[in-house]
């Protein structure tokens, strides 16, 4: 054996490439296809009923918000003095209209778009901030860790909603979707930093990090190429749950008057909080936006749970 | 154990000090006590502003102002509102109102969460489990104020119609000015009737997350070896679940609840706003931010920080007491 294939014995172990190794005798015999970890995770997610329900639901809402306006040409901004507070089903107003004659269906479509914009702005700010702070604290440890985490602890001693209220009350010019996304993002990274730090504290003790160190990899390379990919599961789950929280927080802020409250600004939260005042007199303004918001948040939460199960199937006790 | 508790206590004091500094910095940067005079027509002369600044001590260095405020707070003096009344009296009266709400909500939420969580775990993947899971998902996805409005709209009106008199109230924490002439049973039954709906709306939202947590903890315990051992010894199923399972599965929940009380403090703002409760939440919104009153906001933030820090401490200590496996190093 050794004389016929010397390279097998002298070389190191076969590299663990994803996909089927070419001509692997054992594989052919048992008919097993090797799957990379990513493939397994995606597969588990696709087989997860909860996660897929959420994905379908979210896709439907996104279609409604972004493709809907292409099919339904009524402008939300256009007011009609002759059709104020008409009930659903009135000609030209499938879901009714509000007190100044704006079409609710068009409003919902725009609201979904704006809410997504808020989430996007929030993520663009909070995700890098939280990742960076958490990664630096968890990787370098010592005084960096303790000072950064004490700071996070200190900020978290005041309920997040209250911090947002106090900050937002000083910037009336930020009462737009982008502005609310900005404020949410500036204070929404704290829990991500804690999560990433916790993950890094355990991950950095692993052998592969030591190996990367021994090979002379820089700190930057270890953080971005080795540690973050391995902490990806918790980060993605945070993204989904934080997106859902951001939508709810935006709605709450708007309800209290510190959110999307500028004259022409729209968001789902704005529609919901405007509708609350009309709960008994014009119920369509109350129910439709509320249900739309509920569906989006529900969908995102379901996706988050599906992803969590896909990354960590152990707590399910079901073979994937 | 004692050393652990003392060390945590000292740590908590330092966290509070840091937090008070942060809070003061946030407020000093956000609020200008003179802003309400800027818009006066005609505008007062500069000398007026200079006098006021000197009187309020705004010309002092930031750290000196912080020190003055902090020493005042430590002696129970939270400063005065813009209307010249002391903040401390109002703050603690409001705190009492909110404490009623939060205490009731926490008790209800914990009891419900434990019951539902245990049922969900014991009957995993049965229809009841699915129903509760679905309910929890719905509740987690609801904005507080929308759910509260729903309660006002359906539950309050329905119950009041059914009894043909006002049983549940949707506005205020007690009938206006009742506290002036009534006391004893009359006052407290009135307060109770006002308490029910806000409590439900606040409790159900935390209940949803906590019941999921309790279910997961219970599932963890149910699969453990000592449960199998207990059954093998011949204990009844009920006894193993309640004596061996539930008692262990409650440990993680205590921490979550203790930490969640701080969040409830924030959530109560919205509930109070919906039900027009004159508690802490509306004190912050109306008297504090509405009047641009720095002392009210400062006092509020400090009280909430105390709450959060104290309950973090309670969570730490409780966890160590309940689970001796935790190493106290």
Image (tube, coloured by chain):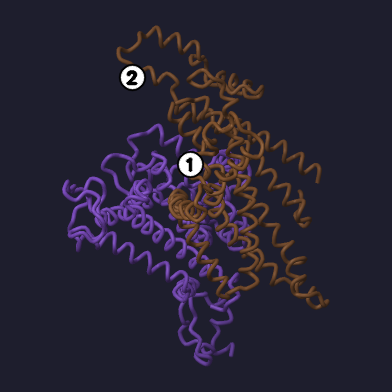
Chain colours: A purple, B brown
Is residue A127 in sight in this rendering?
A: no
In the rendered picture of this protein, how many numbered marks are placed on residues?
2
Q: Nearer the viewer, mark 1 or mark 2?
A: 1
Can you name the residue that lies furthest to the top here? Answer: B47
Image vertical order of residue A193 relative to residue A298, above or below: above
Q: Nearer the viewer, residue A146 or A223?
A: A146
Residue B36 x/y as whole percent:
39, 20
Q: Which residue is mark 2?
A: B39
Q: Is residue B9 left or right of residue A39?
A: right
Assign a secondary structure to mark 1: loop
Q: From what the image shows, is residue A79 above or below residue B115?
A: above
Give coordinates of residue B328: x percent, y percent.
76, 49
Local crowd size for mark 1, using a 10 Å CA cut-off: few (<14), some (14–19), many (≥20): many
**Which residue is painted at 37% across and 64% down in the image?**
A58
Q: Is residue A57 left or right of residue B160?
A: left
Q: Could you say which quadrant of the image residue B314 lies in?
A: top right
Q: Which residue is mark 1?
A: B171
Quick check: can you spot residue A94? yes
Which residue is depicted at the point 21% across and 59% down?
A: A90
Q: Nearer the viewer, residue A264 or A234?
A: A264
Q: Nearer the viewer, residue A61 or B328?
A: A61
């Amino acid at each position: 054996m050794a004389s016929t294939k010397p390279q097998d014995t002298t070389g190191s172990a076969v590299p663990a490439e994803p996909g089927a190794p070419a001509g692997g005798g054992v594989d052919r015999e048992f008919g097993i296809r090797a799957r990379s970890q990513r493939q397994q995770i995606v597969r588990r997610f696709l087989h997860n009923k909860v996660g897929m329900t959420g994905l379908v639901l979210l896709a439907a809402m996104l279609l409604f918000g972004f493709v809907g306006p292409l099919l339904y040409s009524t402008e939300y901004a256009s007011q009609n003095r002759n059709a104020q507070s008409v009930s659903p089903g009135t000609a030209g107003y499938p879901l009714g209209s509000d007190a100044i004659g704006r079409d609710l269906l068009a409003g919902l479509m725009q609201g979904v778009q704006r809410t997504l914009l808020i989430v996007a702005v929030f993520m663009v700010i909070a995700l890098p901030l939280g990742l960076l702070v958490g990664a630096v604290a968890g990787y370098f440890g010592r005084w960096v860790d303790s000072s950064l985490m004490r700071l996070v602890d200190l900020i978290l001693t005041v309920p997040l909603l209250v911090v947002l209220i106090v900050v937002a009350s000083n910037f009336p010019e930020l009462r737009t979707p982008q502005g609310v996304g900005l404020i949410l993002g500036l204070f929404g990274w704290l829990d991500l930093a804690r999560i990433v730090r916790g993950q890094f504290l355990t991950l950095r003790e692993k052998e592969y990090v030591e190996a990367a160190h021994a090979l002379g990899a820089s700190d930057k390379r270890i953080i971005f190429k080795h540690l973050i990919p391995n902490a990806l599961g918790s980060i993605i789950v945070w993204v989904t749950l934080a997106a859902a929280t951001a939508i709810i927080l935006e709605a709450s802020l708007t309800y209290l008057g510190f959110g999307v409250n500028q004259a022409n600004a729209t968001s789902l939260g704005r529609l919901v909080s405007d509708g609350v005042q009309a709960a008994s007199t014009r119920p369509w303004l109350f129910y439709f936006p509320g249900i739309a918001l509920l569906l989006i948040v529900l969908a995102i939460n379901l996706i988050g749970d599906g992803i969590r199960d896909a990354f960590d199937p152990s707590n399910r006790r079901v073979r994937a | 154990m004692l050393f652990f508790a003392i060390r945590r206590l000292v740590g908590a004091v330092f966290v509070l000090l840091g937090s008070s500094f942060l809070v003061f910095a946030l407020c000093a940067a956000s609020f200008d006590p003179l802003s309400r005079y800027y818009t006066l027509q005609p505008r007062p002369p500069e000398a007026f502003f200079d006098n006021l600044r000197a009187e309020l001590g705004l010309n002092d260095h930031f750290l000196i102002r912080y020190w003055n405020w902090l020493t005042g707070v430590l002696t129970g003096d939270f400063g005065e509102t813009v209307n010249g009344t002391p903040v401390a009296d109002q703050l603690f009266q409001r705190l009492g109102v909110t404490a009623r709400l939060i205490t009731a909500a926490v008790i209800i939420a914990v009891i419900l969460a434990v019951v539902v969580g245990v049922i969900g775990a014991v009957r995993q993947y049965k229809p009841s489990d699915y129903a509760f899971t679905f309910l929890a998902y719905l509740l987690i996805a609801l904005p507080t104020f929308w759910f509260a409005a729903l309660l006002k709209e359906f539950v309050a009106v329905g119950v009041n119609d059914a009894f043909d008199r006002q049983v549940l109230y949707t506005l205020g924490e007690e009938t206006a000015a009742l506290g002036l002439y009534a006391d004893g049973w009359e006052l407290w039954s009135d307060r109770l009737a006002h308490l029910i709906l806000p409590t439900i709306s606040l409790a159900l939202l935390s209940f949803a997350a906590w019941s999921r947590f309790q279910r997961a903890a219970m599932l963890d315990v149910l699969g453990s070896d000592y449960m199998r051992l207990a059954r093998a010894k011949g204990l009844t199923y009920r006894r193993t679940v309640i004596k061996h399972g539930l008692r262990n599965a409650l440990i993680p929940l205590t921490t979550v609840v203790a930490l969640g009380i701080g969040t409830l403090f924030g959530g109560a703002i919205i509930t109070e706003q919906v039900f027009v409760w004159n508690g802490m939440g509306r004190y912050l919104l109306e008297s504090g931010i509405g009047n641009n009153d720095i002392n009210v906001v400062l006092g509020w933030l400090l009280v909430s920080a105390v709450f959060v820090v104290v309950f973090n401490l309670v969570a730490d200590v409780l966890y160590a007491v309940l689970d001796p496996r935790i190493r106290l190093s």
